[in-house]
């Protein structure tokens, strides 16, 4: 599913959200962004982390809580459950949107290792955690050592949800990174063609669409996209667009 498959109102709302994300300057604006996203995607709760994993596998993170109970978050952080929570641990190494039940299916560590974290969730009535009903999105940061994890609790597995969250989460992470973390300004310059193709990617165009519009081969389009992703240290096209917007390499029309 692509942005073209959303309704006109959904697509417009999503683009407005992305526009707002590029202009965030205060940490409270991140929570406002998540609240606006909630109008498009009916998750029950949401939270985010920005942090890094050291050589011993320990995670140091700054968290942003949207509407989880404060007492739950305090206890979760106090017990350092983010170091054993499979949704967090997995997402700090997999840079993509994942459904929780899919994470649990392939998670190799025994449940006893993380039952404390899940037990706390149950104590606060967050049963969807055990049931695997939610999404997590891991995002790679520009500097390579400080990544992000976004959590959306209480969601069914639907293509519409996946499309909106996949397209918006990198922009939310870039806003978090800019405000709470570190940004890098020493990026290699993009060519005019690379910027042009990025702008069409922002419009949701496919490789074939762009090749037709610019009257060049699909292979050439893919070459420029791959080159742009390498320059920006992006893990996918959506991530590349988010970085380019944050660094003002392209403008959101």
Image (tube, grey):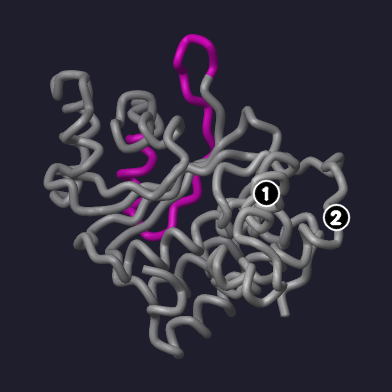
User: Visible in this render: residue 101?
Assistant: yes
Say which residue label 2 marks. Answer: 191
Label 1, secondary structure: give it.
helix
From the top left corner, tell me how far across and down residue 34 is, in percent: 47, 65
At a point 38% along the width and 24% down the height, the residue shown is: 83
Indicate whether 163 appears above or below 150: below
Frontmost residue, 37 versus 90: 90
For marks 1 and 2, the one nearer the N-term is 2
Label 2, secondary structure: give it.
loop
Pick the quarter of the image with the C terminus.
Answer: bottom right
* Circle 2 Cα neighbour tier, 10 Å, few/some/many (<14 / 14–19 / ≥20): few
Q: Is residue 203 left or right of residue 31?
A: right
Q: Residue pushed farthest bottom?
A: 8
Q: In which quarter of the image is residue 182?
A: top right
Q: Quadrant of residue 123?
A: top left
Say which residue label 1 marks. Answer: 223
Tell me how far mark 1 sits from mark 2, CA to CA.
Answer: 13 Å
What is the magenta range? Answer: 54-76
At a point 63% along the width and 28% down the height, the residue shown is: 145
* Circle 1 Cα neighbour tier, 10 Å, few/some/many (<14 / 14–19 / ≥20): few
Q: Is residue 92 left or right of residue 24?
A: left
Q: Which mark is residue 157?
A: none
The reply to whether discs 1 and 2 touch (Cβ–Cβ < 8 Å) is no
Q: Is residue 64 magenta?
A: yes
Indicate whether 244 appears above or below 57: below
Pick the quarter of the image with the N terminus.
Answer: bottom left
From the top left corner, tell me how far across and down residue 156 is, in percent: 19, 62
Q: Is residue 241 magenta?
A: no
Frontmost residue, 189 versus 153: 189
């Amino acid at each position: 599913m692509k942005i073209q498959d959303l309704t006109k109102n959904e697509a417009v709302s999503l683009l407005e959200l992305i526009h707002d994300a590029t202009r965030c300057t205060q940490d409270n604006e991140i929570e406002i962004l998540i609240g606006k996203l909630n109008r498009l995607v009916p998750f029950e709760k949401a939270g985010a982390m920005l942090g890094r994993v050291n050589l011993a596998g320990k995670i140091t993170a700054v968290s942003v809580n949207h509407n989880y109970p404060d007492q739950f978050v305090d206890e979760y952080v106090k017990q350092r459950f983010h170091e054993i929570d499979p949704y967090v641990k997995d997402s700090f190494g997999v840079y993509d949107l994942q459904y929780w039940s899919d994470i649990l299916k392939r998670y190799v560590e025994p449940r006893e290792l993380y039952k404390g974290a899940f037990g706390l969730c149950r104590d606060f009535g967050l049963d969807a955690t055990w049931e695997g009903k939610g999404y997590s999105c891991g995002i790679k940061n520009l500097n390579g050592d400080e990544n992000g994890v976004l959590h959306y609790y209480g969601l069914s597995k639907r293509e519409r949800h996946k499309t909106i969250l996949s397209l918006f989460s990198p922009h939310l992470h870039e806003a978090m990174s800019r405000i709470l973390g570190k940004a890098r300004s020493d990026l290699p310059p993009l060519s005019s063609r690379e910027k042009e193709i990025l702008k069409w990617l922002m419009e949701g165009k496919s490789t074939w669409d762009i090749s037709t519009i610019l009257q060049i081969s699909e292979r050439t389009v893919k070459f420029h996209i791959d080159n742009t992703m390498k320059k920006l240290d992006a893990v996918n096209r959506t991530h590349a667009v988010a970085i380019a917007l944050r660094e003002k390499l392209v403008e959101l029309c």
